[in-house]
Amino acid sequence: MKPHILVISFAMILLLSFPLVVCADEVENLIKQLNSDSSEVCESAVKTLLKSQNNLGMVAIAEELCKSDSRYRIKDALVKTGTLAVAPLIDLLKHTDEQVRSAAASCLGEIGNMSAVEPLIVCLKDESSSVREEAAKALGNLRATKAVDSLLGLIRDNILVRQEAIEALGKIGDERAVPELIDALKETIRQYPTLDNTCRVSQLAAALGRIKSPEAIPILVSLLGYGNSGTRSCVAEALDSIGYIPASDTEKIDFLVAKGDWLAIAKMGKPALKPTLGCLKNGDPIIRAGAAEALGDMGDVSAVDSLIAVAKDSEALIPSAAPKSGGALNGRSYDDIIRETAIKSLGKLGDRKAIVPLSAMLPEWGLNKVLAESLKRLEWKPQTEREKLYTLIGEHDKQRIEEQWDLFGPLLLEDVESGDRKRIYNAICSIVSLGKEDLVDDLLQVLRENGTRVIAEIYLNSGNLRLRVGAESWAKKKGYQIVPGGSRDAGWRSW
């Protein structure tokens, strides 16, 4: 390199090594810019203040980190500033305000400079749990193997700190953590033998899966049946990561159930039949739904009686003392999803034993479509006019219903006045879907005389003005609040 180029390069290094000289007025202006709505302006101000190493600037940055309305904007600016911010942030780890220390730890983890490792390890003993939490998370992001022993000291801390420490150990991937993580799992199961701490089990399993130590396989295999479907899935995913291969059909079935791979279970055939039937007794609705589907795919008619029971009541086979969980998926209750799945499977199995119970269920609005389809697969023919009506409703066959309206109309009105909740609901939804304007007065009379919030919500969201006004008036008199969009079971003239 030529001498003059060396001189220039050395001069530039010296220039960059010294603080940027900024006058007092400019510092004040930069501090004001920290509150700018423009992220670019805020970032530029942070960068300039850091370069200047001005004490007032650093105090202002720390003050902004204390404020909830500006904290995230300043953090983002510090992270984007990168290496220049590392030393000042390390200094802020000693700040008197825990919010500043916590924010500084978070920024250091995102910047990713390894010079922050030792100061962050010190923060794992901070009196503030939020600082310990952010320091643990940062050390995980830095993959700091030096921090393993200190992080292990936090896996029995409060729930948020513990979660970040466990996740950090998984990210670091050091096998030194495995024995302690396994001990923590065993301790958790002893304390919470059923469903009470599935979150912690999932976290520990995920960390062991990321470390990929075969030493963890026995404890993870023992947990394939622990807790709900979400926990089992985490355990199975961890075993997958480690490269676990089931040693027997029993282990394979437990593994596949935990993974939710019901198609693979169905392909196993006879060996999987009894365990899959047993899953219909599980309190977790996702497991029961998967089992109901797999039994239909297996093609073994010995499952018919159990599926009939579940088609009638999704919780019919669950032991009374067993824990249960409900919920919904995409706006549908798990109860309906499980029953629908069982009904479909009965249609696939083709055993005519299912005809009587399924045909009796036809006037159920949420299930009548799949009921009609399964009964058709079973080669069932409606015997009565009412059965014909219910089948056509299930098929949404507006044309054939209207062609025989003189016959079917009175049957629907009889159902509306029947006092049977399912028949009433089915009839109202059918009339709304057909868009029978001449029956609106009858529907409003039902609401006035025997109305419920469910019926009112159907009317409110039906798309018919008179029904909506009637629902609003009824709700006001009853002191109820019904919300538009709360129910969309039937739309006016939707067929």
Image (tube, grey):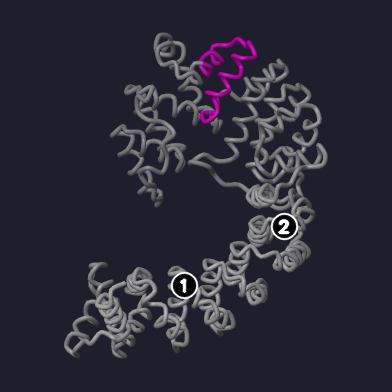
Q: Position of residue 231 (x, y in %)?
A: 66, 52
Give the answer, above or below, for where 404 lies relative to 211.
above
Q: Quadrant of residue 33?
A: bottom left
Q: CA distance from mark 2 to mark 1?
A: 28 Å
Return the residue found at the far left. 25
Foreground: 364 or 260? 260
Give the answer, above or below, for where 12 lies relative to 363.
below
Q: Quadrant of residue 351?
A: top right
Q: Residue at x 33, y 22 (%)?
A: 438
Q: Secondary structure at mark 1?
A: loop
Q: Is residue 308 visible in the rendered structure shown here?
A: no
Which residue in the protein does label 2 denote? 213
Q: Earlier in the sequence, mark 2 or mark 1?
A: 1
Magenta extent: 363-391
Foreground: 89 or 489? 89
Q: Residue at x 33, y 82 (%)?
A: 61
The reply to whether the C-beta atoms of the residues labelled 2 and 1 are less than 8 Å apart is no
Quarter of the picture holding the C terminus: top left
Q: Secondary structure at mark 2?
A: loop
Which numbered mark, 2 or 1, is in the foreground of this view? 1
Residue 365 magenta: yes
Which residue in the protein does label 1 denote? 113
Foreground: 225 or 104? 104
Q: Residue at x 68, y 47 (%)?
A: 240
Give the answer, above or below, for where 485 lies relative to 77.
above
Instruction: Please indicate whether residue 475 sits to the left or right of residue 350 in the image.
Output: left
Instruction: Please indicate whether residue 416 sits to the left or right of residue 468 in the image.
Output: right
